[in-house]
Amino acid sequence: MSGKLILVIEDNEKNMKLVRDLLQYEGYEVLETETAEEGLRLVEEHIPTLILMDIGLPGMNGFEALKCLRASSATAGIPVIAVTASVMTQDHQKIMDAGFDGYQRKPIDIDEFLEAVRVTIERSFGERSTE
Ligand code: MN
């Protein structure tokens, strides 16, 4: 799994630490930031394999950030998983309607979370290799 770069956009220190530790343990490289604005800059610079996006962020929120990513051809194809404390069914629907590639609830379920990361990256590579 080495060489796979994951950008984590998360403003909660505790959640960030957990996600970072899990991903690094699995052998992923992790880039991190607390804001969507900084995240968008990092995406342009590093073109990560996957983005994990908190929805509630201090400035621009996760929905707005996804819109920016999808609007640029350089970043439109990068898979983005929303990670949010929201558990309402209508919020889940809103997240999928917005075009996120997946959705993970906080507090995260470790096995389910890592499986979603793995599958989303695999799917994305599969799509690219058949283009
Ligand atoms: Mn947050």
Image: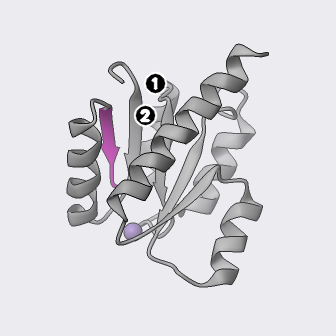
Image point 20% across, 55% down: which residue? 17
Say whether residue 84 is left or right of residue 64.
left
Looking at the image, do the residues carrying marks 1 and 2 touch, with CB atoms under 8 Å apart?
Answer: yes
Q: In what element is the residue under mark 2?
A: helix
Q: In what element is the residue under mark 1?
A: helix
Q: Position of residue 57 (x, y in %)?
A: 44, 66
Q: Between 24 and 56, which is closer to the camera in this rendering? A: 24
Q: In this view, does 97 lie above or below 8?
A: below
* Predominant SS along the magenta part: strand
Image point 77% across, 63% down: which residue? 97
Q: Quadrant of ligand 1?
A: bottom left
Q: Is residue 128 above or below residue 13?
A: above
How packed mark 1 is, by other alpha carbons closer than 10 Å (few <14, some 14-19, many 20 or more), is few
**Applied colour scheme:** one colour
Q: Mark 2 points at which residue?
A: 42
Q: Where is residue 128 in the image (x, y as percent from the top left)?
A: 69, 20
Quadrant into which the N terminus falls:
top left
Magenta span of residues: 29-34
Residue type indicated by callout 1: Glu
